[in-house]
Image (cartoon, rainbow, N blue to C red):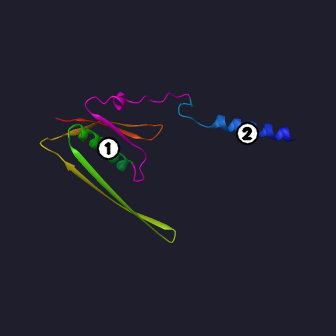
Amino acid sequence: MRLVKILGFAALVFIAACATRHPGADGLAQPPRPAWIENPGDGVSSSAAFHVRGKQAQEELAISRAREEFAKRYGVTISSDHDIAQTTVNDRMSSVSEKAIREEVRDREVKAQVKEKWLDPVTGALWVWLVPSD
């Protein structure tokens, strides 16, 4: 009887493992990542994962990260302060967020534009490619 239980449990684990979906396991090829993610040329690539405030906030975060990286290349200093205050009263929590961005440019104007965006279907991360603009 004990052997039957062990074999039944092993079979159950095996079936559960086979039923688990993995990216690409359905026989469909996953779309390749764009080449500009690894090799952005004169631009920069940056990403942002899931954002609790939605797709627009996710895109703004990815672009903000790309701008900061792009600015570093040209001697621009960008500082960002993000303050979050959380309060809990009687099992109810609330959060207040405030973000301040300061840019310092010395004798240089830096312009950039988003050339492409790509949403990773596996991870849900949004990638942006920021390039110099004219």
Q: What stretch is highlighted in magenta?
A: 27-54
Q: Distance of mark 2 from mark 1, alpha carbons? A: 46 Å
Residue, far left: 107
Report which residue position mark 1 lands on.
Answer: 65
Q: In which quarter of the image is the N terminus?
A: top right
**Which quadrant holds residue 76?**
top left
Pick whichever, 24 or 73, lies toward us: 73
Is 14 magenta? The answer is no
The amino acid marked with disc number 1 is Arg
71 on left or right of 55: left
In percent of width and height, residue 89 lies at 48, 71
In percent of width and height, residue 121 lies at 45, 37
43 on left or right of 119: left
The amino acid marked with disc number 2 is Leu
Mark found first going from the N terminus, 2 or 1: 2
Q: Residue at x 27, y 33 (%)?
A: 43
What label does residue 12 carry, if any? 2
Q: Which residue is drawn at 70% across and 35% down?
A: 14
Q: What element carries label 2?
A: helix
